[in-house]
Amino acid sequence: MPSLRIAQDDAADELLSRDPLALLIGMLLDQQFPMERAFGAPRLLADRLGVDTLDAAQLAAMDPDELTRVFQGPPALHRYPGSMAGRTQELCRLLVERYDGRAENVWADAPDGKTLLRRLKELPGFGAQKASIFLALLGKQYGVTPSGWREAAGAYGEDGARRSVADITGPDSLVEVRRFKQEQKAAAKAARAGG
């Protein structure tokens, strides 16, 4: 079992390490929200549902209004609890329909990185960048390394990179990833101002 340190909270990171659905939901929620809180949210979700491990079939079948209330907290599981509750439910429904309700089945039999990247892009809420980052996270920290995974993940798959959640292994690397993201934002802002 991997030992992730993304949420910077022992209980949350323990769940991410052993529950592929929790990891997938954390990645889904990592959007317009602090990274640690996004990846800490699956632990809060499990606690509020009174379960030890998240279950895609249970989440898919929940009353949408009830799931939204669970997401609203307090504290809220995301800056946009209603829309993210809906997106989480969409993700879980797709997992039930295509992958027997098991997040790990998305990657378990992927013959290569290109196929896995395509599967990840098909998940609700996973655009090209999020899919590439998650592929890098699976390869770098979760032991999921189909042939060509680094190439399929692009720059996020580079060994020694400090670009994304895929590279966070503790507080120091979190600081390095934050610094990289701030530099990227500053460069983009300067490019817009100069253009």
Image (cartoon, rainbow, N blue to C red):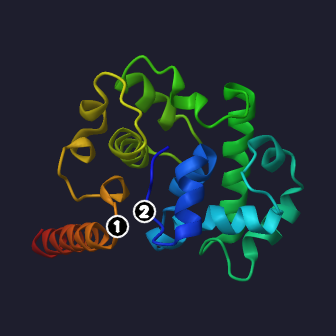
Q: Which mark is residue 178?
A: none
Q: Image point 24% across, 31% down: which residue?
A: 151
Q: Which mark is residue 170?
A: 1
Quadrant where the image shows the C terminus = bottom left
On the question of residue 28 being in view, the answer is no
Are there few (<14), some (14-19), or many (20+) residues within 10 Å of tag 2?
many
- Left or right: 148 in relation to 94: left
Q: Secondary structure at mark 1?
A: loop
Q: Image point 37% across, 20% down: which residue?
A: 112
Spatial CA distance of label 2 from label 1 is 5 Å
Report how many numbered discs are placed on residues in the image.
2
Question: Where residue 182 sits in the image (x, y, percent)?
Answer: 24, 74
Nearer the observer, 35 or 11: 11
Q: Which residue is mark 2?
A: 5
Q: Quadrant of residue 143?
A: top left
Question: Where residue 122 sits in the image (x, y, percent)?
Answer: 54, 34
- Left or right: 141 in relation to 65: left
Q: Image point 64% across, 61% down: which residue?
A: 42
Is the residue under label 1 in contact with that under label 2 (CB below 8 Å)?
Answer: yes
Q: Image point 57% across, 39% down: which residue?
A: 123
Relative vertical location of residue 73 with respect to residue 146 in this rendering, above or below? below
Question: Where residue 185 sits in the image (x, y, percent)?
Answer: 24, 71
Q: Check disc 1 and give the amino acid type.
A: Gly
Q: Secondary structure at mark 2?
A: loop
Q: Quadrant of residue 97?
A: top right
Relative vertical location of residue 88 with respect to residue 143 in this rendering, above or below? below
Question: Where residue 188 sits in the image (x, y, percent)?
Answer: 20, 68
Farthest residue in the left direction?
194
Closer to the chain start, of discs 2 and 1, is 2
